Amino acid sequence: MPMEKDRKTKVLIIEDQDEYRGVLRQLLENEGFEVSEAAEGRLAIEQAAAVQPKLIISDIVLPDMHGSEAVREIVKSNGFRDTFIIFLSSLIGNGNADAGEMKIDVDGKKYVGMAKSTSRQTILTTIDRVLAN
């Protein structure tokens, strides 16, 4: 079921690669999401407190901390227990777009992890599924 384009779900992208972050931003804004972004974990923690995202899409390897550490801090310090998390990383699937999903455990909670090379349509389908839960 496609996302309602007028819903304006807030999404925070945590990604240090400018080009990939821009591609994700454009993809999500074209689908009606309200997008914020951060290139580092510490900035992401501040940004999350400011924008209160419903969904966080995070890289795993960031310049200043591990992506799971940033997510842990966001959830703990800002009380985002109902925020949905998706990890996109080149570490997942060794760059194989067909690698599928894996579960990433952060403090006992399982989050979706996918390769950065995953198709745009699969990313959108996964976002729809995650937000529907």
Image (cartoon, rainbow, N blue to C red):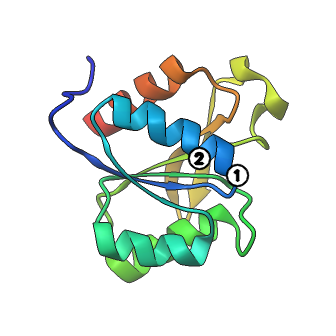
Q: Going 19% across and 27% down the picture, which residue do you hit? A: 4
Closest to the observer, 122 or 34: 34
Crowding near the residue tagged with mark 2, few <14, some 14–19, many ≥20 C-alpha atoms within 10 Å: many
Q: Amino acid under label 2?
A: Arg
The quarter of the picture where residue 116 lies is: top right
Tag 1 residue: 17
Q: Amino acid under label 1?
A: Gln
> Which numbered dot is residue 41?
none
Q: Going 28% across and 66% down the picture, which residue do you hit? A: 52
Q: CA distance from mark 1 to mark 2?
A: 6 Å
Residue 94 sits above or below residue 34 on the image:
above
Q: Can residue 133 be seen here?
A: no
Position of the C terminus, as image quadrant, is top left
Closest to the observer, 42 or 92: 42
Secondary structure at badge 1 equals: loop
Q: Position of residue 132 (x, y in %)?
A: 26, 33
Secondary structure at badge 2 equals: helix
Q: Residue furthest right?
A: 94
Q: Is disc 1 in contact with disc 2, using a CB cutoff of under 8 Å?
A: yes
Position of the N terminus, as image quadrant, is top left
Tag 2 residue: 21
Q: Can residue 82 be seen here?
A: yes
Q: Position of residue 73 (x, y in %)?
A: 50, 77
Crowding near the residue tagged with mark 1, few <14, some 14–19, many ≥20 C-alpha atoms within 10 Å: few
